[in-house]
Amino acid sequence: MSIDRFIIKKLDNCHEQTRINLVKLFQLRIQQAEKAENNGKKTG
């Protein structure tokens, strides 16, 4: 299972603090993907 699907699945069944942490992790993954995409456009 990919980490993204794992995070989404866990969001439904966790405590509030865990949910906050999972959302932060998901936001970081999105930011990293956007950064990698933008770097690819600049060099590509």
Image: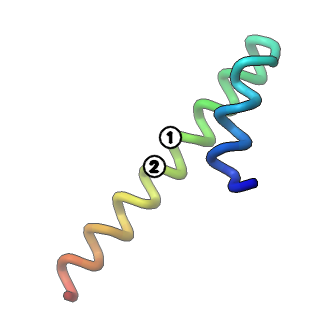
Q: Quadrant of residue 42?
A: bottom left
- Neighbor class of circle 1 (other Cα within 10 Å; few <14, some 14-19, many 20+) is few
Report the residue at 42% width, 51% height from top.
31
For label 2, the residue is 30
Looking at the rendered structure, the kind of residue marked 2 is Ile
Q: Which mark is residue 5?
A: none
Report the residue at 53% width, 52% height from top.
29
28 relative to 13, above or below: below
Report the residue at 35% width, 63% height from top.
35
Q: In whole angstroms, how far apart are the C-alphas of marks 1 and 2? A: 5 Å
Q: Secondary structure at mark 1?
A: helix
Residue 19 image offset from top left, x and y in percent: 70, 21
* Relative to 31, 4 lies left or right: right
Kindly give the residue lying farthest to the bottom in the view shown.
44
Q: Quadrant of the N terminus?
A: bottom right
For label 1, the residue is 27
Q: Is there a contact, CB below 8 Å, between mark 1 and mark 2?
A: yes
Looking at the rendered structure, the kind of residue marked 1 is Gln
